[in-house]
Structures are given as structure tokens and as C-alpha cells.
């Protein structure tokens, strides 16, 4: 009898702990649900979920093969950063701005809107798509011409501002300055960050007080800059560009936070550290692949090529998604996209974004529940 009572007490103890965990998690979810958080997105291909023109590669096979199973305007085999943040908020990905006239009003009102266009930057780039300032103009037009969002909607929602380096790519494509020129780099970075901060301030003035801005990923670890080392080593020169950009970004956003701290409804702007999370993801994926291979009995495991893209052109003349004049494929896709970090030469795969987002969750959580 005594043994039966002890077992019952232990079972009750674990049941209480289990119920406590459920209540805590439900409390967090209810906060998000109660606040009716919506997501507004500005930026480039790291965040675009369907704004780019239909002839863009993101609308062609094999893009989208993991999710949603067909090309849908995402520059990946599946989900991108926007999708993971939306899921974290407990909502579906916001409606792409170019689809606003073709979807039900309630979807626009409930989830928010995505104004990001692949290939764009803070300034005009090689892509003839709206830069970030124009994207915010679109947002202003939506707020002025429609009744989708109330003041409270904007106050409780989140703006994602994504910048992945297209301004630097446009600068280098002109061939007017060398990347090693620190003076030229400093002037370029300062102008990019100053305009970015001005854009963030505009979003704040429109009523969105929760804003997350992406730091620059380690540019030197992108496949174009690791190919010469068989995708083993990052370019320190290009990584120094990211480091300098992120240093100035933190300084300028901190200054903006200081200026707006006296406002009663202001919140500090959150920097999403893509640099650290990319590097951590590389290490974690390498360890996971090595551990899996070792467990399977393959003890002669070479260092996995984490920075090697999954989808590539069959030669330098082609890229992921390329076809010849007869419609024949001029690209190849790796056997296991779910194990890759990079989908193509620039963009993470769904697996890559999942690994990166796992490192961003905690900082986002603190911003959202306030």
C-alpha cells in the first residue's frame, strides 16, 4: 500500500510539472494571439515571398520544390526568413504586395503585407524593382487608401527590414572602386546605413513600433566567394565588409534608439544578427552531418561542404533554374536539399533558414511580447 502511494505521488508531481509547462507555453501563444500581431516586410530576396516578376528565377523550377512543392516566388527550395518569422508570430506569411488585388481582404487584414522585392537594396540596384524607400511608399499608400489596419494593429505588429548586400553588389558591378579601398568602403557603408536608418524612422512614424532589422550575413561565406577553395573557406576580405557594415549599423540604430527613447510607446529597434547565426549554423550543420555519418558506420568522413550550393548551373554560363533554347535543363540539384545550407549561389535553403532562425528566436520573443 505504501509503495502504491509513493508511485501515485511521483506521478502527480510529474503531471503538475507537465501542466505548468503547457500553461506557460499557452500563455505566450495567447499573448501573441490576443495582440493580433501582423507582419510587414521590406527588403530583398531573403524576405521576398512573391513580389518579384513572374519571369524571375524564383517563379521557375526547381525553386519551391520543398515548399510549397512548386515555384511560388521564393528564392529558395522552400521557406525563407519571412515564413519563419510569420510562423513564430502564429500567423501565415503576409500577402505579397503585388497580389493585393487578387486575395480576400481578410487575409490582408489578418496577416499583414510583404513589400520586399528580390534583388533590391536601400538604393537602386541592378534589378529594376522598387528600392526600400519606394516599398515604404507602397506601405503609405496602402494605409492611406484602405482600411485594412487600425492604429492598434500597427502598434502591436512587427516590421521586418531585410538587407542582404545588393547595394554592395551594385557598387562593385560598376567597377568604379576597389573593395580594398577603405575610404570608398566607409563612404558607401555610411550612406547605406544612413538611408536605412531614415527608412526605419519612417516606418516608426507610420505607427509600427516593433521593428527588426537584419544585420548583414557573412558575405565572404556566400558560394561565389568560397568556390575557389572548393567551398571550404570564407573570404576574409568580403567578410570584413559585413563586419564594418554591422558595426556602423549597430552604432546608428543605437543613436536612433536614444533619440526615440523618450517617446512613451517607443521600443528599441532589434538587430537580427544574421552574421553570427549564419556562422553558428555552418558549425552546427557540419557537426550534425559528421555525427550522422559516424553513427551510420562511415568512419572515414571528410569535412562536409556546408557552403556548397545545392542547385547550380552545369557550367559558368548557367545558374540554378537555367534552360537552353529548347527548354532543356542546364542545372543540377543535389540529392538531399534538406541537408544543404545554401540552395543556390546566394540564397539559403529552407534547411539553412531553419537553422538560422533557431538562433534568432529568443531575441524576437522579447521584442514581440512587449
Image (cartoon, rainbow, N blue to C red):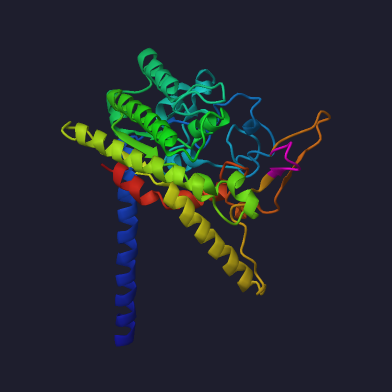
Q: In this view, does 69 lie to the left or right of 192?
A: right
Q: Which of 108 and 23 is in front in this view?
A: 108
Q: Which of 28 and 211 is in front in this view?
A: 211
Residue 315 magenta-highlighted? yes
Residue 350 magenta-highlighted? no
Q: Nearer the viewer, residue 250 or 144?
A: 250
Image vertical order of residue 356 relative to residue 324, above or below: below
Viewport quadrant of the C terminus? top left
Image vertical order of residue 123 relative to residue 290, above or below: above
Image vertical order of residue 140 relative to residue 302, above or below: above
Count the labels in the image. Answer: 0
Q: Give the range drawn in magenta.
A: 312-319
Residue drawn at x 45%, y 46% as measured from the top left: 240
Q: Position of residue 314 (x, y in %)?
A: 76, 43
Q: Which residue lies furthest to the top in this view?
A: 145
Q: Where is residue 262 in the image (x, y as percent from the top left)?
A: 15, 33
What predominant SS class does the magenta segment belong to? loop
Amino acid at each position: 500500500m505504501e509503495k502504491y502511494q509513493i508511485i501515485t505521488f511521483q506521478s502527480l508531481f510529474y503531471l503538475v510539472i507537465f501542466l505548468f509547462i503547457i500553461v506557460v507555453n499557452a500563455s505566450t501563444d495567447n499573448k501573441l494571439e490576443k495582440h493580433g500581431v501582423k507582419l510587414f516586410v521590406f527588403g530583398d530576396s531573403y524576405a521576398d515571398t512573391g513580389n518579384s516578376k513572374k519571369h524571375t528565377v524564383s517563379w521557375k523550377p526547381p525553386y519551391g520544390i520543398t515548399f510549397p512543392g512548386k515555384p511560388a516566388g521564393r528564392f529558395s527550395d522552400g521557406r525563407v526568413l519571412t515564413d519563419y518569422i510569420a510562423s513564430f508570430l502564429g500567423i501565415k506569411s503576409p500577402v505579397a504586395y503585388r497580389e493585393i488585388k487578387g486575395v480576400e481582404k481578410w487575409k490582408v487584414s489578418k496577416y499583414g503585407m510583404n513589400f520586399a522585392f528580390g534583388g533590391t537594396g536601400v538604393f537602386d540596384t541592378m534589378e529594376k524593382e522598387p528600392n526600400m524607400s519606394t516599398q515604404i511608399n507602397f506601405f503609405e499608400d496602402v494605409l492611406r487608401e484602405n482600411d485594412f489596419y487600425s492604429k492598434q494593429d500597427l502598434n502591436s505588429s512587427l516590421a521586418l527590414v531585410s538587407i542582404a548586400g545588393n547595394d554592395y553588389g551594385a557598387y562593385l558591378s560598376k567597377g568604379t572602386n576597389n573593395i580594398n579601398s577603405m575610404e570608398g568602403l566607409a563612404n558607401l557603408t555610411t550612406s547605406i546605413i544612413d538611408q536605412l536608418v531614415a527608412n526605419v524612422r519612417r516606418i516608426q512614424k507610420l505607427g509600427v513600433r516593433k521593428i527588426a532589422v537584419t544585420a548583414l550575413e557573412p558575405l565572404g561565406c556566400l558560394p561565389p566567394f568560397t568556390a575557389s577553395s572548393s567551398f571550404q573557406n570564407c573570404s576574409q576580405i568580403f567578410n570584413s565588409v559585413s563586419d564594418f557594415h554591422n558595426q556602423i549599423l549597430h552604432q546608428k540604430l543605437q543613436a536612433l534608439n536614444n533619440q526615440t527613447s523618450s517617446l512613451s510607446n517607443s521600443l528599441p529597434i532589434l538587430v537580427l544578427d544574421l552574421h553570427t547565426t549564419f556562422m553558428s549554423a555552418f558549425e552546427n550543420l557540419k557537426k550534425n552531418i559528421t555525427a550522422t555519418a559516424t553513427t551510420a558506420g562511415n568512419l572515414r568522413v571528410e569535412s562536409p561542404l556546408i557552403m556548397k550550393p545545392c542547385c547550380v548551373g552545369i557550367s559558368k554560363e548557367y545558374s540554378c533554374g537555367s534552360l537552353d533554347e529548347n527548354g532543356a535543363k542546364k542545372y543540377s540539384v543535389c540529392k538531399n536539399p534538406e541537408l544543404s545550407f545554401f540552395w543556390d549561389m546566394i540564397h539559403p535553403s529552407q534547411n539553412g533558414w531553419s537553422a538560422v532562425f533557431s538562433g534568432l528566436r529568443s531575441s524576437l520573443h522579447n521584442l514581440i511580447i512587449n
